[in-house]
Amino acid sequence: MTREAGRSVVRFSIFAVDLALHCIALLSDGRVLASGGFENCYHSCVIQDTAELYDERTGQWDWAPGTMAAPRSAGHILVALPDGTALVAGGYSGSQYLALAEIFCPP
């Protein structure tokens, strides 16, 4: 991440998988968390129950440990919390809209 005149400009490498309709949040430790979304919409869309973490020190996206309680795509939210965790809520699972929230605790 570079800082220019009070602004932060983040340059990323590509995700581990092609994603669409995912959410992204900047965690308090400077890493970036991407949750859910569709993978591989060129042939058939697979809704993800996974998350990826971007670390600017390595310049790489890596899989976050574990999976979410349900796959999430369009309509879910991801909110970074002050304690370093993140709230993920709602979204579409492929068969229904979710009334479900969970906390992600990065390693």
Image (spheres, rainbow, N blue to C red):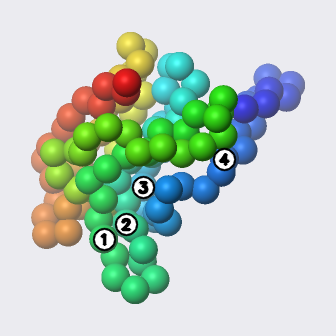
Residue 22: image tag: 3
Amino acid carrying mark 2 in the image: Phe
Q: CA distance from mark 1 to mark 3?
A: 12 Å
- The quarter holding residue 87 reads top left
Amino acid carrying mark 4 in the image: Phe
For label 1, the crowd category at 10 Å Cα-Cα, with few meaning under 14, some 14 to 19 and many 20 or more, is: some
* Mark 1 secondary-structure assignment: strand
* Mark 3 secondary-structure assignment: loop
The residue that appears at 29% across and 65% down in the rendered structure is 47
Q: Earlier in the sequence, mark 1 or mark 3?
A: 3
* Mark 4 secondary-structure assignment: loop
Amino acid carrying mark 3 in the image: His
- The quarter holding residue 91 reads bottom left
Residue 46: image tag: 1
Considering depth in this image, is 61 or 79 the residue closer to the camera? 61
Residue at image mark 4: 12
- Given contact means CB atoms under 8 Å apart, are the residues at marks 2 and 1 in contact? yes
Residue 77 seen by the camera: yes
The residue that appears at 51% across and 20% down in the rendered structure is 28
Residue 38: image tag: 2
Number of marks in the rendered image: 4
Q: CA distance from mark 2 to mark 4?
A: 19 Å
